[in-house]
Image (tube, rainbow, N blue to C red):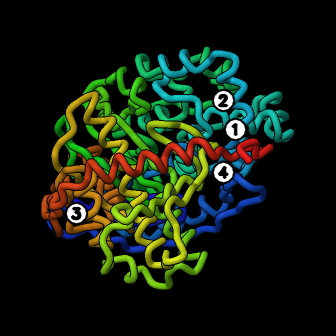
């Protein structure tokens, strides 16, 4: 049996084909453009993404099933009859709905959203973006008036156009702020709060199940990319934890059932997956907005030319020398949920070099992740082993520092394409197959410094500065 996975991510669309007895390989990858029409806005062209998904599907060859992994919170609107996009894809990083979020918080809606959806009020999630589309795009309002409107996350658009199935999966729906975690259905009161008509949203289905056919091949799984990575890491027991270092850094730890106390610690209860008619499996989620994005930013500043420059440093950790960087270029996610927090450097002197700044950037990403792990472990069980993937795992310095500041063993897998592999593995379940877990560790990093807790305490000072020097239109902090 061979299963295909199409991973439609923030920067590219990738195809993987995996078999029960062979090593998985990415067989095709294509990047798409990033559009930034205004400061804080980030859009993708829906037609470009759809074409890339179609190209990947055409190159899958003979497979028994296909799975689709999506960006999670990125969303759009389209015409139900023609399939024409009525809006751009508003990407999860987009911050245009900050004023709307502030109004909802001021009006006292956050407790209800937390209780029903499990999510804080934040521009990260889809609901406020969908509401913005109806408020600001006349074509979307006209389509709603005439009964031709469809809205949702990008997976629903791809499935609708390619298989004729207007649906999303429960893991993706749990990232919208519109789904009730108890009923696993759209919540009419949440839809009212955000100004999103629930009758124009897709059907919510289990992660593994029928989603139609694509070029004659059954699509048997649809899932958020981070949840796909969680499955690809082999996380199956409560406490199993993975961290994916992509554009952002995303920590997911399996909890089995919903943990309401996660919200109290600034974390997010989310659905990991639901396989057929089985009970859904929950996880606890904590995110860092800027990981790979921060690295790309400092490269754009000319602080380094080649990523190999970041694999090791001759100097002691920058944080031990009083230099720290909070990479809050898009604000702070868990546990602060403050989009207006500013990125800050603390402790620069005339002797600070560009290499020092690079070192501090890597450490800042690791220290923000360590803060998330600390909050998780304070509230519930988190394994003493962290399975990691993503672009930053090629830096041995970063991985050792991460082990030191989390106080946990950090493990990388033999394959770095765990999102696609997890998606393919879920798709295989839909046709009665099962791909093997990728258990081989390519590298293991154990904590070796006793200074991790001290470094975290030092970093808290930089975090407080980040929260103090807030970014707002008036720059009132100045």
Report how far apart the C-alphas of labels 3 and 1 lie in the structure. Answer: 36 Å
Q: Which residue is mark 2?
A: 200
Cα separation between marks 4 and 3 = 32 Å
Residue to which mark 3 is pinned = 412
Comparing 166 with 196, the one in front is 196
Indicate the quadrant where residue 439 lies.
bottom left
Q: Secondary structure at mark 4?
A: strand
Horizontally, residue 25 falls left or right of residue 123, namely: left
Q: Residue at point 15% right, 56% down? A: 436
Q: CA distance from mark 4 to mark 1?
A: 17 Å
Q: Position of residue 91 (x, y in %)?
A: 61, 50
Cβ–Cβ under 8 Å for marks 4 and 3 = no
- The tag earlier along the polypeptide, 3 or 1, is 1
Is residue 273 visible in the rendered image? The answer is no
Q: Nearer the observer, disc 1 or disc 2?
A: 1
User: For mark 1, what is the residue?
Assistant: 98
Which mark sits nearer the N-terminus, 4 or 1?
A: 4
Q: Mark 3 Cα within 10 Å, few/some/many (few <14, many 20+)?
A: many
Question: Which of the two labelled residues, at mark 3 and mark 2, occupies the earlier sequence position?
Answer: 2
């Amino acid at each position: 049996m061979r299963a295909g996975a199409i991973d439609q991510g923030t920067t590219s669309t990738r195809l993987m084909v995996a078999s029960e007895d062979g090593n998985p390989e990415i067989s095709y990858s294509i990047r798409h453009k990033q559009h930034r029409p205004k400061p804080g806005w980030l859009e993708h062209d829906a037609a470009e993404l759809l074409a890339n998904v179609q190209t990947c599907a055409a190159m899958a060859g003979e497979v028994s099933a296909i799975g689709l992994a999506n960006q999670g919170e990125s969303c759009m609107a389209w015409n139900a009859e023609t399939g024409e996009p009525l809006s751009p894809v508003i990407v999860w990083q987009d911050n245009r709905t900050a004023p709307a979020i502030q109004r909802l918080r001021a009006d006292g809606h956050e407790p209800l959203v937390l209780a029903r959806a499990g999510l804080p009020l934040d521009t990260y999630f889809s609901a406020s973006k969908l509401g913005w589309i109806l408020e600001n795009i006349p074509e979307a309002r006209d389509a709603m008036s005439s009964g031709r409107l469809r809205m949702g996350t990008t997976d629903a658009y791809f499935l609708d156009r390619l298989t004729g199935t207007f649906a999303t999966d429960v893991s993706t729906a749990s990232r919208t702020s519109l789904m009730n975690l108890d009923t696993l259905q759209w919540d009419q009161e949440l839809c009212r709060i955000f100004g999103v008509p629930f009758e124009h949203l897709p059907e919510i289905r289990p992660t593994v199940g029928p989603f139609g056919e694509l070029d004659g091949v059954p699509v048997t799984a649809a899932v958020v990319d981070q949840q796909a990575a969680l499955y690809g890491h082999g996380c199956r027991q409560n406490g199993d934890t993975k961290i994916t270092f992509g554009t952002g850094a995303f920590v997911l730890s399996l909890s089995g059932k919903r943990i309401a106390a996660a919200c109290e610690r600034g974390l997010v209860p989310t659905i990991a997956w639901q396989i057929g008619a089985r009970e859904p499996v929950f996880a606890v989620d904590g995110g860092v907005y800027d990981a790979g994005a921060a690295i790309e930013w400092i490269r754009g500043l000319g602080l380094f030319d080649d990523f190999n420059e970041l694999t090791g440093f001759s100097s002691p950790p920058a944080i031990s020398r009083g230099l720290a960087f909070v990479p809050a270029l898009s604000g702070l996610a868990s546990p602060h949920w403050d989009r207006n927090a500013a990125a800050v450097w603390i402790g620069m002197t005339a002797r600070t070099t560009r290499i020092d700044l690079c070192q501090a950037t890597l450490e800042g990403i690791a220290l923000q992740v360590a803060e998330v792990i600390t909050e998780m472990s304070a509230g519930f069980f988190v394994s003493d082993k962290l399975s990691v993937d993503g672009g930053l795992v090629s830096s041995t310095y970063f991985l050792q520092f991460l082990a030191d500041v989390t106080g946990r063993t950090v493990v990388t897998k033999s394959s770095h394409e765990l999102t696609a592999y997890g998606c393919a593995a879920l798709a295989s379940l839909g046709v009665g197959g099962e791909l093997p877990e990728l258990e081989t560790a390519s590298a293991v990093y154990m904590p070796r410094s006793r200074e991790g807790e001290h470094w975290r305490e030092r970093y808290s000072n930089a975090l407080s500065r980040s929260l103090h020097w807030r970014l707002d239109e008036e720059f009132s902090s100045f």
